[in-house]
Image (tube, rainbow, N blue to C red):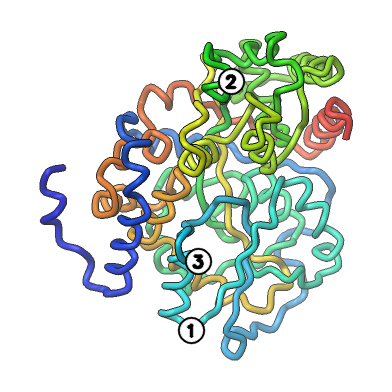
C-alpha cells in the first residue's frame, strides 16, 4: 500500500473532489477500522443474492400489470429517495451528503433524500394501500431487503427498469446478478449487504459476548434490544440452536426459536424489539447489548468514541441485502434510474462503502477504496474475510403460506 500516494486519480474533477473529501472524512476512522480481515466477497454475495425470499405475505397482481405512468423526468428535475438511517455518506461539517451533491452538480437533478425506513414491515404497512391502488407514494426509489423486495415485485408494486438508463449496472457483482426474487434483475439493484450479529457496550459489559445465549445472562436483564426483522432475530436464535437456516428446516425449528424469544420478552430480559431505532437505546445507555446490524455499530463507534464491540456469534450470523426499487406510480422513473447508475460507478460506490461500512455490491469498489483509504480495503465489514464467510448464513426463501404463518408467529412472540 506504500505506493498509494502515486496512484493515478480519476480525470473527472468532480470525482477527484469527492475522493479528496472522502479522504478527509475518513481520517478519524483509520485507527478505528485498521486491522480488520481479508477479502473473499464473491462467496458472501452469492449467498446474499440467492437468499432473499420469493415468498411474502399478501397476494397481489403479477409484476407489470399496473397501468402506465407518464414519466415527467424531462421537465421535473427532482428525485425522491427513501432509505434506512445512516446508510449514505454524510459530511458532519457541511451537514450534506457529498455524493448527492455531486449527482446534482452533474445532472441538475435535485435529490430529496429521507431516512424513512425503520423496518421492512413497518414501511410496507405505511405504503401498501397506496401501492395497491396504483398511487404515487411520493418516493421514486425505495430501499428494501431481499424478501420484501421480492414481495413488492411479485405484487406488481414496482416499475421495470430501463437498462439503457443504467449502463453501470454492468458493475453489479456477478454473484448478485441472478437472484430468485427478481429474475434477470428487471426491477431491482442491490444497494448494500451486511450481517446481523451481536454487540455490547465494552465499558458497561467488559466480559463481552460469544453467543446469542449469552444475551440471556441475568446481569443483562432489561438491557437487551433485538431486531424486529424476523429473519435476522429468529435466524440468529435458530443458528444458536444448531439449525442450518439455509437448509430444509420447518415448523418445529421455527417454533422453538420463537418460544425462546417470547420467553425472554415476557421475563423482561429483552427491553425492546426495534428496527433501526435500536441505536438510540444503545447511545442513551438504556440498552447495553443486543442483536444488531454490523455497519451500524461501526458508525456509532465513530461518532461515540468507540463504545461498542460487534462480533459474529460462534454459531454464525445472518446475511442480507437491501435493494433499490422504483415504485409503481413514480412519475420520475428516468431520474431514479440515473441516480441508480451514478451509485454504480466504482468511485462513488467506494465512497458510500467507506462511510456506511456495509458490503458494496459494485465491482471495482475495492480498487477505488485504495484511493480513498487503503486501510479500509482490509475492512472485513466491507470486503469480508474467508473466516467470516464460513460463519455467514442466509435465511432460506419462504413461500407465501410460510411467510404469512411465520411472520404472524413472530409478531405474536414480540407482542405486536
- Image position of 94 with respect to 267: above or below: below
Given residues 315 and 246, the one toward you in this image is 315
Residue closest to the far bottom:
75
> Left or right of 78: which side holds 365?
left
Q: Which badge, 3 or 1, comes first in the chain's sequence?
A: 3
> Left or right of 208: which side holds 118?
right
Label 1 SS: loop
Dot 3, crowdedness within 10 Å: few (<14), some or many (≥20)?
A: few
Q: Which badge, 1 or 2, comes first in the chain's sequence?
A: 1
Labels 1, 2: front one: 2
Tags 1 and 2 touching, CB below 8 Å? no
> Left or right of 269: which side holds 101?
left
Q: Which picture quadrant has residue 21?
A: bottom left
Dot 1, crowdedness within 10 Å: few (<14), some or many (≥20)?
A: few
Cα separation, mark 1 vs mark 2, equals: 49 Å
Q: Residue at the location (64% across, 63% down)?
A: 114
Q: Residue at the location (52% across, 15% down)?
A: 206
Q: Which residue is mark 1?
A: 108
Labels 3, 2: front one: 2
Tell me residue 130's x, y (percent). Answer: 83, 65
Dot 2, crowdedness within 10 Å: few (<14), some or many (≥20)?
A: few
Q: Which residue is mark 3?
A: 96
Residue closest to the far top:
218
Tell me residue 236's x, y (percent). Answer: 63, 22
Quarter containing the C terminus = top right
Cα separation, mark 3 vs mark 2, equals: 34 Å
Q: Which residue is mark 2?
A: 204
Quarter containing the N terminus = top left
Tell me residue 165's x, y (percent). Answer: 48, 74
Cα separation, mark 3 vs mark 1, equals: 17 Å
Amino acid at each position: 500500500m506504500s505506493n498509494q500516494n502515486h496512484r493515478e486519480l480519476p480525470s473527472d474533477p468532480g470525482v477527484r473532489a469527492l475522493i479528496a473529501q472522502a479522504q478527509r472524512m475518513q481520517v478519524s476512522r483509520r485507527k478505528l477500522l485498521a486491522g480488520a480481515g481479508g477479502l473473499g466477497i464473491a462467496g458472501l454475495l452469492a449467498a446474499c443474492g440467492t437468499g432473499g425470499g420469493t415468498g411474502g405475505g399478501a397476494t397481489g397482481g403479477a409484476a407489470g400489470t399496473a397501468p402506465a405512468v407518464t414519466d415527467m423526468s424531462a421537465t421535473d428535475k427532482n428525485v425522491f429517495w427513501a432509505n434506512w438511517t445512516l446508510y449514505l455518506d454524510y459530511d458532519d461539517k457541511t451537514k450534506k451528503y457529498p455524493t448527492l451533491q455531486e449527482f446534482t452538480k452533474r445532472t441538475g437533478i435535485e435529490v430529496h433524500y429521507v431516512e424513512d425506513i425503520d423496518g421492512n414491515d413497518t414501511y410496507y404497512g405505511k405504503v401498501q394501500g397506496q401501492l395497491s391502488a396504483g398511487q404515487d407514494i411520493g418516493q421514486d426509489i425505495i430501499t428494501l431487503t431481499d424478501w420484501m423486495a421480492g414481495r413488492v415485485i411479485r405484487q406488481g408494486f414496482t416499475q421495470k427498469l430501463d437498462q439503457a438508463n443504467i449502463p453501470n449496472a454492468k458493475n453489479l457483482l456477478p454473484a448478485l446478478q441472478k437472484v430468485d426474487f427478481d429474475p434477470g434483475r428487471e426491477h431491482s439493484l442491490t444497494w448494500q449487504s451486511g450481517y446481523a450479529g451481536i454487540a455490547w457496550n465494552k465499558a458497561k459489559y467488559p466480559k463481552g459476548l460469544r453467543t446469542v445465549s449469552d444475551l440471556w445472562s441475568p446481569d443483562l436483564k432489561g438491557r437487551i434490544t433485538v431486531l424486529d426483522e424476523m429473519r435476522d432475530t429468529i435466524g440468529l436464535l435458530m443458528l444458536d440452536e444448531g439449525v442450518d437456516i439455509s437448509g430444509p428446516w420447518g415448523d418445529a425449528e421455527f417454533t422453538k426459536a420463537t418460544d425462546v424469544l417470547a420467553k425472554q420478552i415476557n421475563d423482561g430480559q429483552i427491553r425492546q424489539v426495534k428496527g433501526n431505532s435500536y441505536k438510540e437505546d444503545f447511545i442513551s445507555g438504556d440498552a447495553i447489548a443486543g442483536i444488531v446490524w454490523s455497519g451500524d455499530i461501526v458508525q456509532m463507534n465513530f461518532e461515540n468514541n468507540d463504545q461498542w464491540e460487534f462480533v459474529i456469534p460462534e454459531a454464525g450470523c445472518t446475511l442480507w441485502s437491501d435493494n433499490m426499487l422504483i415504485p409503481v406510480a413514480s412519475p420520475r422513473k428516468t431520474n431514479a434510474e440515473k441516480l441508480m447508475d451514478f451509485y454504480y460507478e466504482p468511485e462513488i460506490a467506494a465512497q458510500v462503502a467507506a462511510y456506511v461500512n456495509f458490503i458494496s455490491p459494485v465491482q471495482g469498489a475495492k480498487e477505488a477504496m485504495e484511493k480513498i483509504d487503503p486501510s479500509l480495503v482490509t475492512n472485513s465489514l466491507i470486503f469480508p474475510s474467508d473466516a467470516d464467510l464460513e460463519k455467514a448464513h442466509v435465511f432460506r426463501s419462504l413461500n407465501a403460506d410460510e411467510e404469512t404463518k411465520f411472520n404472524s408467529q413472530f409478531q405474536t412472540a414480540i407482542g405486536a
